[in-house]
Image (spheres, grey):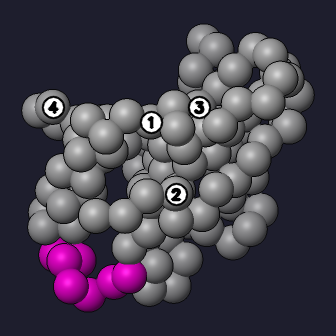
Amino acid sequence: MNFRDKGEKIAAKYLQKLGYQILAHNFHGRDFEIDLIVRKKKLIVFVEVKRKTSTDFIDPVRGISSKKQTRIIKGAKYYLLTNDLYDRVDVRFDVILVRGEEEDLEHIEDAFRV
């Protein structure tokens, strides 16, 4: 398992402990990729996972460019449309930063908006 995949696995395990259902890993299409898509009741959360080797302070939200945010939003719209969920669920965009080799993480809910 590569470094990035391990970070996504750690994030997925964390979200499951919080009661989220994992709907998709690495959902991608033309010009977008979403690391995790999870659901809790009527809430669908599109999650960007960042993993760093250092435990130094990192601002995970600032690390996601407006271009990357636009691509995630594009993918979210596509996912909602193709799964007949558009206007039927609440949507949120989160960022999870996994630091180092351990399960040290920071979860930023509602990290950015459409």
Q: Quadrant of residue 20?
A: bottom right
User: Counting residues from the N terminus, which is met first, the one under dot 1 or under dot 3?
Assistant: 3
Mark 2 or mark 4: which comes first in sequence?
A: 4
Q: Amino acid at mark 1?
A: Ile
Taking the image as shown, residue 76 lies to the left or right of residue 103, namely left
Residue at 24% of width from left, 45% of height from top? 70
Q: CA distance from mark 1 to mark 3?
A: 9 Å
Residue at which label 1 appears? 64
**Marks 2 and 1, the one that precedes in the sequence:** 1
Stretch in magenta: 83-90
Q: Residue at x 38, y 73 (%)?
A: 91
Q: Label 3, on which residue?
A: 50
Q: Which mark is residue 111?
A: 2
Report the Cα–Cα distance between label 2 and label 1: 10 Å
In the rendered image, the vertical position of residue 39 relative to residue 28, given as above or below:
below
Indicate which disc residue 31 carries: 4
